[in-house]
Amino acid sequence: MTAAHAPRLLYQVKQVELAVRGRLDDVVRPRGITVTQYTALTVLEQHPGMSSAQLARHAFVSAQAMEGVVRALLDAGLIERVRDPENRRRMAISLTPEGIALLEACRDDVDRIEAEAFAGLSGVERTALGRWLQEARRALEHPAPPVD
């Protein structure tokens, strides 16, 4: 297959994303949450105290969609929202012990999905892939100005 007829990298990345999303859905749905809710929980695990707008950006959804996610997670007792003592207008969101426990309950299954997806890569290759994906995301979030 020539380069002109090979699938675009963007298409291949999307295929992987859809396959991962399907597998994650199989793990989280029986636990009563969606993949988007799971993503929000994992973001909060790494960055506790985010605002809803920050969480939306990190979880790749609109601010409006995140309001529904936050409401569902609050109702399920998986997160809490408290007024930020440094900025009284800002509500900081963090995991509850139940949210932490749910993530821990999913960890082995999610680790297994990741291991299956990247079984053909060495540790060095996995590290390089992670770096390349981060670089691609940053490049798209902060595009270079056009060259005249």
Image: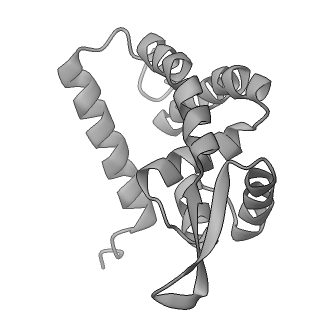
Q: Quadrant of residue 15?
A: top right
Query: According to the image, what is the colour scheme of the structure?
Result: one colour
Q: Residue furthest front?
A: 97
Q: Quadrant of residue 18?
A: top right
Residue 3 in sight here: yes
Residue 14 in sight here: no
Q: Position of residue 99 (x, y in %)?
A: 61, 43
Tell me which residue sits at (46%, 20%) in the image.
111
Instruction: Describe residue 68's horizontal placement relative to residue 37 as left or right.
Output: right
Q: How many marks?
A: 0
Q: Position of residue 77 (x, y in %)?
A: 73, 50
Q: Quadrant of residue 118?
A: top left
Q: Is residue 143 above or below residue 30?
A: below
Quarter of the figure that contains the C terminus:
bottom left
Q: Is residue 148 above or below residue 114?
A: below
Q: Position of residue 41 (x, y in %)?
A: 59, 47
Front residue (pair 125, 87): 87
Tell me which residue sits at (45%, 88%) in the image.
86
Q: Residue furthest left?
A: 124
Q: Is residue 23 above or below residue 42?
A: above
Tell me which residue sits at (37%, 9%) in the image.
119
Front residue (pair 90, 68): 90
Q: Position of residue 110 (x, y in %)?
A: 53, 23
Tell me which residue sits at (42%, 14%) in the image.
115
